[in-house]
Image: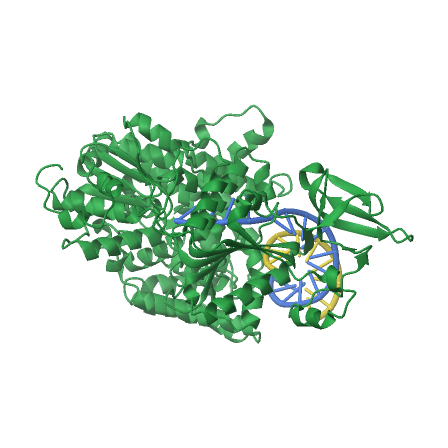
Chain colours: A green, B blue, C yellow
Amino acid sequence: MFFEDNTPDLLRHLNPQQAQAVECNPKTSALILAGAGSGKTRVLTTRIAWLLQNQHAGVHNIMAVTFTNKAAKEMQTRLSAMLPYNLRAMWLGTFHGICNRFLRLHYRDAGLPQTFQILDSSDQASIIKRLLKQLNIDEKSLAPRTLQGFINAQKEAGLRANVLDAPDPFTQRLIKCYAEYEQLCQREGVVDFAELLLRSYEILNANPALLAHYQSRFTHILVDEFQDTNKLQYAWLKLLADGGAAVFAVGDDDQSIYRFRGANVGNMTQFLRDFQINQPIKLEQNYRSVGNILAAANAVIQNNTDRLGKNLRTDAEAGEKISFFAAYNDIAEADFIVNEIKELKRENWQLNQIALLYRSNAQSRVLEQALFQAAISYKIYGGLRFYERLEVKHALAYLRLAINPNDDNALLRVINFPPRGIGTRSIENIQAAAQQQNSSLWQAAQGMGKKIAPFIELVEQLRGQVGVVSLAELVKSVLDLSGLIKHYQNQKQISEQERVENLEELVNAATGFRVEDVQLDMLPENLADNPALPVIAFLSNAALESGENQAGSGDQAVQLMTVHAAKGLEFDAVFISGMEEGRFPSELSMNEAGGLAEERRLMYVAITRARKRLYISMAQQRMLHGQMQYGVPSRFVDEIPDSLLHHLSPPSKSRNLNDNSHLIFNQTAPAISRTELPREFDGFLIGENVRHEKFGVGVIIDASDKGNGSANLTINFGAQGVKELNTAFAKLTKI
DNA sequence: ATGCGGCGCCTTTTT
DNA sequence: GGCGCCGCAT
């Protein structure tokens, strides 16, 4: 199309819309609206290859940004396979990874120590708790979570404490704490996730020469999952592209599910305006799902307004209908899923091609238990990841002290772990001294008593090893000299033995760690002569990539994860569990403006993960957070046309209780039984779903016998409210 | 000064 | 079910 096209091979496997996207004008920006399963990654990587092969750009002119490390790696792998070039000069990584590289390169401009550490969200939470204590603010009057959310939201909007103002005293106090937090982090040389971006943006903005350099270098910026960018990320991109770079943004407004952490779908329309793009290019051909599944996804998402407008189509056959199962309780739901998985296994479906999705991590427990008892191997993604484990964080804290003893957070974490007789009192003394002389805890702790001396000695010893011994040796030293490993070895419980294994695994990770391989996090050249380089790289890697790829994807195991975690993945068979109103959509989202629409997009993401078969299930009763919850089917189930659904009727206990079916009952009884037999009230059970001609579908949450054969039922009809009805008068049908 | 048991409170999604 | 806090025993 442009110039001589010497890459027909590249385009051969693309459909016309994909080819149009890949070959669009290399000098101007473009927005690609790419539906689920429409070949988004292929278009993105082919575009890069096309730019290079047609000499529209050199490798060093390209920056490619993704949100997850997984996506970055995937792109890296595909590009390496596609192209004969060395791609090292290309900046390819996550927003956070790229900004990390940038700040390490320009640490002086950024006003940071070269060895600055990255806080993950739990590190940030503990700093905030410490801060509140220091400021004498009661956690009840200001929840740490609230402050943490406030700080991150402000940073993501590009706002520093000194430009904020508020009329109400509560917000004023938040702003004050934000300012204190900034100081604290600065003093300790630590940087949270949002700070990586904000600081990068600020130094570019404040330094014309620097900005000009990067603007002329990066002539092509490609962005994946553009719908997930927040305002700050967009401003950063816009600043970088302001010298005339062509931005190739790929996204799907229907898959925007990270609004809660600042993602702003509005960036897509903003982008069209700011970069003068007439028409987005739409990829609407779906190559993933069978017809019925796609039809269900389209039907659900159509209930959202303000979409950019896009309808996926497929040439695939209709396939099977979507199975819907309403279980009596969560355990029965898990049993249903396990039985279906067994059946799939018999039909030779690959276990690792089966995914089990849920809205929140807490729902995984029951499913896990059922899978475990059925001896079906499974793999859980998310939840506690490797680098987030307590013992691993302890070990990393020692490592952080080894390169920066002024890291107060790290010091507090391990000064008395394993226990070495430094109690709350001593720590308070150190903190007071530090505050008085405006120094770090480490400095204040010098010469403060004989209990503390061995700890100081220990840290000094570790510091002396940095750059002298290998990274793996250093980690081993940490475990041995600190007594961490011995501490856990002395514990009797099996769970503690697992911690020993994790620590050993950490040594393995350090042994296998190659600084050169961290190309994705891209450590800059000016660090090369710093003896702490491997340690810094290792720690950055741990913070930015908290072990998300540790799962052996090749293993034959059912994949368990939240719907969020499933984005970007696909499976032959998918189970969406816990489809109850209030769980999915989550009732917490209902109070927020636009919350329901976001939940619906989440449902859209969940449905479109499935290639061939989709199951949707719910539990009328569920034990969650130690409380019994009663649920009716999610509204999202109602939004799927009935013609696409296949209702699998649950084994109805109430119907069978009076005949001799107790044998069947025993047979289907959950392996882990939680309650005795449910009691009947005029044929109804607590937790059962019923339909009332006026109030619609509800769930029985309480009942009492009237003595004359009828019963009073308390029924929750959701939006229609809670009603008390007598079975003798009300027309109720079970469903 | 530390360790441990009991009690009350919260509870979504993640780079 | 998990976590922080408190009070008591060591």
Residue drawn at x 15%, y 50% is A9
Residue nearest the viewer, comparing A407 with A634: A634
- The residue positioned farthest toward the right in the image shown: A708
Q: Position of residue A344 (x, y in %)?
A: 47, 66
- The residue positioned farthest toward the left in the image shown: A4
**Mark count:** 0
- The residue positioned farthest toward the top in the image shown: A167
A467 horizontally vs A154: left or right: left
The quarter of the displayed image where residue A625 is located: bottom right
Q: Position of residue A101 (x, y in %)?
A: 28, 47
Q: Position of residue A441 (x, y in %)?
A: 47, 51
Residue drawn at x 23%, y 47% is A14
The quarter of the displayed image where residue A213 is located: top left
A607 horizontally vs A492: left or right: left
**On screen, A342 above or below A547?**
below
Residue drawn at x 42%, y 39% is A254
Q: Position of residue A525 (x, y in %)?
A: 21, 51
Residue drawn at x 45%, y 72% is A501
Name the quarter where the N terminus of chain A is drawn.
top left
Residue nearest the viewer, comparing A32 with A184: A32
Res. A266 visible in picture: yes
Res. A625 visible in picture: no
A471 horizontally vs A442: left or right: left
Residue nearest the viewer, comparing A726 with A597: A726
**On screen, A284 above or below A209?**
below
**On screen, A267 above or below A446?**
above
Residue nearest the viewer, comparing A379 with A98: A379
